[in-house]
Amino acid sequence: MSEKGLHLGLIMDGNGRWAKMRHLPRTAGHLAGLKSLKKVVLGAINQNVKYLSLYCFSTENWKRSEEEVKYLMSLFSSKIYGELPFYNENGIRILTLGDLSPLPEDAKKAIADTIRATENNSVITVQLAINYGGQSEICQAVGRAVADGVTEFTPEILRSYFEHPEIPPVDVIARSAGEIRLSNFLLYDSAYAEFIFCDKLWPDWNEEDVAFVLKEYSHRVRRFGGVK
Ligand code: FPP
């Protein structure tokens, strides 16, 4: 963990299965997932997490049905800015990670307004990964570095061209809903992250699941390739 504080990444999986089990459309699972997200953010604050990165929409999620993509975009347009009192009451700074350019204009505006309105909050930084992919993140950083005339790379030099180099690398990544894979999330920064996989579907998560993840993490011995 850096001296800036703990960075937790979450892969919020299982919304579709949660809805299917209830004979509801997949979109109902995403709405339920948004509700659990608020509980999880409060749980992260209680556990003194300083950075929380949330995988909201991947560069591959555009392959989903038009209805589902449209619904997720409508959540970004209508729900992110609407939670401003919640962010300000709890000291939550919102940032995003990923290429927002293909998003609908109202979603881009809502996100930009939210980032601006929460920039002085300092209890926790919540990064929403939207149209994010770890491979694209690396390619875009290389592109920016090359345009800047960089010819010799180190891991640190390349990382300085990432979108938010000031944010420390993720310490622990947890994934809900039983799948054991990274799905293109935080590829570069997860080099020495700890991984925790939980069976519970994302819409069933709450404060206690964050406490469970961090308790599990506290038992891990991190050696970063060295010897303890
Ligand atoms: C994966 O479950 C979940 C997603 C692709 C979307 C996650 C988005 C949210 C929780 C809402 C975020 C919204 C805002 C405004 C921040 P899945 O659909 O792949 O589930 P399945 O594997 O059971 O089908």
Image (spheres, helix red, strand yellow):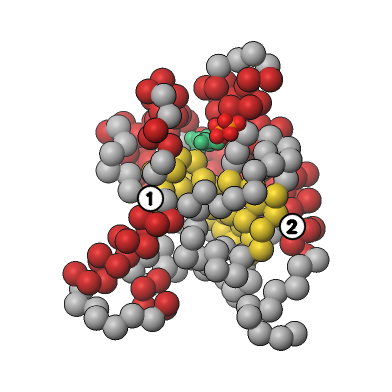
Q: Is residue 12 above or below residue 214?
A: above
Taking the spot 46% from the left edge, 48% from the top edge, the residue there is 129
Label 2 belongs to which residue?
Answer: 214
Q: Is residue 205 visible?
A: no
Report x, y in % for residue 128: 47, 47
Q: Quadrant of residue 227?
A: bottom right
Taking the spot 44% from the left edge, 43% from the top edge, the residue there is 58
Q: Quadrant of residue 4?
A: bottom right
Mark drawn on residue 98: 1
Q: How far separated are the C-alphas under marks 1 and 2?
A: 26 Å
Taking the spot 50% from the left edge, 53% from the top edge, the residue there is 185
Q: Is residue 168 above or below residue 225?
A: above
Query: Quick one: 50 or 24, which is closer to the camera?
Result: 24
Query: Quick one: 199 or 117, which is closer to the camera?
Result: 199
Q: Residues within 10 Å of mark 2 (few under 14, many from 20)?
A: many
Query: Quick one: 6 or 220, which is closer to the camera?
Result: 220
